[in-house]
Amino acid sequence: MKRNLVVLNVILPLSISLSIAVSVAGQTTSFHLASLEWLSGCWESRDDAKQLVLSEQWMKPEGGMMIGMGRTIKSGKAVDWEFMRIEERGTDIFYLAKPKENAGESPFKLIRSSAAEAVFENPEHDFPQRVIYRLAKSGNLEARIEGTTSDGKAKGIDFPMDRKKCQ
C-alpha cells in the first residue's frame, strides 16, 4: 500500500510536471503580421557631410504582407536599392530581401517580436544572418543587420532612421 502511495504522490506528479514542461518547451511562438504595423511609413537617414541619404518605406500590413523598398542616394545619385516584403507563410512570418545586386530573394524568418522590435534570421545566409528593426522610445527606427562574414568575423551595421512624411 505504501508503495502505491509513493507512486501516486511522487512519481505521478513528477511525470505530469515533466510532460507539461516538455509540452511548453516544444510549442512555437505565434507571431501576427499586424503587430508590425509600427514599421509602416517612411524612414530616412541623412548624412550631409557624406552627401548620403538612406531611405526606406513600408506599406501597412494588409492581405498577409507588408511591402517595402529602400534606396541609397550618394552625391545626388541613386547608388543602391532594395525591394522587401514581410509576409505570412502558414504560421510563420518572413522578411524577404531583394537587393539590387542579387538575382533572387533572401528569406529571413521572424524569430522574435514585440511591440517595438522584430528580429528576422536566416543562419544559412551569407552576411547578414539577422535583420533587426527596433522602434526607439524617441519614435526613431533603429535598423540593424548582423552576423558572421565569410572570413568568420562577427559584424553589425546600424542604420538609425527618422520617421518622415511619405511623399
Image (cartoon, rainbow, N blue to C red):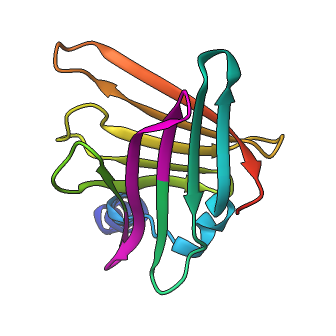
What residue sits 56% from the left and 50% below the top?
56
Name the side, left or right, on which 112 lies relative to 147.
right
Residue closer to the observer: 111 or 85: 85
Determine whether 148 is above or below 115 in the image.
above
Determine whether 146 is above or below 68 in the image.
above
Name the side, left or right, on which 112 lies relative to 160.
left
What residue sits 27% from the left and 46% below the top?
122
What residue sits 57% from the left and 70% below the top?
59
Q: Can residue 11 be seen?
A: no
Q: Residue furthest bottom?
A: 63
The reply to whether the magenta stretch includes residue 9 is no
Q: Quadrant of residue 136?
A: top right
Determine whether 109 is above or below 162 in the image.
below
Range of residues picked out in magenta: 70-94
Where in the figure is residue 33, as x and y percent of width and height? 52, 72
Quarter of the rendering occupied by the C terminus: bottom right
Q: Can residue 45 be seen?
A: yes
Where in the figure is residue 48, as x and y percent of width and height? 69, 22
